[in-house]
Amino acid sequence: MEKNAKIYVAGHRGLVGSAILKNLKEKGYFNFVLKTHKELDLTNSNAVADFFCREKPEYVFLAAAKVGGIVANNIYRGQFIYENLMIQNNVIHQSYINNVKKLVFLGSSCIYPKEAVQPMKESALLTGPLEYTNEPYAIAKIAGLKMCESYNIQYNTNFIAVMPTNLYGPNDNFNLETSHVLPAMIRKIHLAKCLELNDWNTIKKDLDTRPIEGISGKSSEKDILKILKKYGIQKASDIVQVEIWGSGTPMREFLWSEDMADATVFVMESVNFLDLTSVIEGKEIRNTHINIGTGSEISIKNVATLIRQLVNFSGELRFNTEKPDGTMRKLLDVSKINSLGWEHTVDIEDGLNKMYLWYNKYIVE
């Protein structure tokens, strides 16, 4: 990419999109076209067509998506499949129609079968049933990567699909109704620590910043305690408890969002579709997407323990085995991206510390 190339980052306010924009700016890119959801609804086909026709971006990062944790994925199944399919279809198709030079589409590691051999290679795609709780989201993401692959084959586009593992970092979603496991645990254990200290001032600041089901810092202490209990934070006798869904035994791989952004920009700058197809004429072209991760994993219980130590919470972590665990392991094989020349830099311990510092600075204060 030329430094003055016109770049569209879809989802630039989100966890990954904001990190991609920051990375690009640090590398000297400056010609951006950016639209908030209010300014451009990516599920609206006509609006997206008008936008691309008017703006003519040269490079597109498709980081916009309807996302959430295990609870949100399981409850809002229709919204997750519809909105993600519409966003992808509109942006990818209009990128083709308007001769975008290159597009990078961000998927998810949940595209792989529930019982896939670990670590999961790109070739594991479509070899078995998906995890039920996030099946609609996974199917949408599979459709997106296959759309990129299919357009490349038929129309000679240069659309690359990258599949990140579980992400966390600045601008993460700490809304307990919809958040992923790691930011949810950070916020819940942070609030539990405040309850342990009887620090109502900080609890109210937190809820003013991120109300839970309409309960803010201006609500009564009785109502606050009630909503905290609903989300697994309560004082039982003299001990504050934090409930975590599942047994704590599932293993997860976590990638710092700014590492993911760096990998995404690296792919945009250095990797082309033809680099991913060492296929001779007449053979099938498939699995050209790229896994992005760390190649290492940690149990949910150990992550919770690390957060507990970081927050200095002395209460009880209670794992509710009546709630679903989800997939037991989700470790990506990252040999493809490593062979292309990229590796992660932030390990989980350092990342958790960075994230909690960010949370306290930008969410609580």
Image: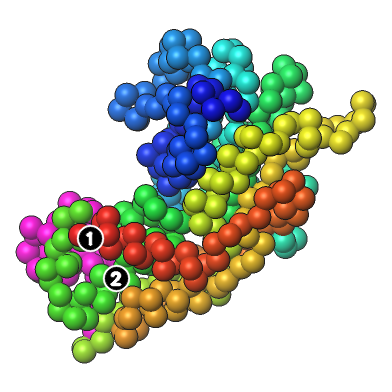
Label 2, label 1: how far apart the Cα atoms are: 10 Å
Please indicate whether residue 179 sits to the left or right of residue 153 in the image.
left
Question: Which residue is at the front of the view, 235 or 194?
Answer: 194
- Specify the farthest residue to the bottom: 238
Q: Which residue is mark 1?
A: 364
Query: Looking at the rendering, in which quadrant would you find the N terminus?
Result: top right
How far across and how far down the image is residue 6, in percent?
Answer: 50, 22
Asked if residue 190 is positioned above or below residue 272 in the image, the reply reads: below
Q: Could you say where residue 12 lies in the image, as x and y percent from the top left?
A: 41, 36
Q: Is residue 262 among the parts visible in the rendering?
A: yes
Residue 358 falls in which quadrant of the image? bottom left
Q: Residue at x 61, y 57 (%)?
A: 344
Element type where label 2 sits in the image:
helix
Residue sitting at x 48%, y 68%: 350
Q: Position of residue 318 (x, y in %)?
A: 39, 79
Q: Which residues are magenta?
A: 210-236
Q: Which residue is mark 2?
A: 190
Q: Is residue 171 left or right of residue 351?
A: left
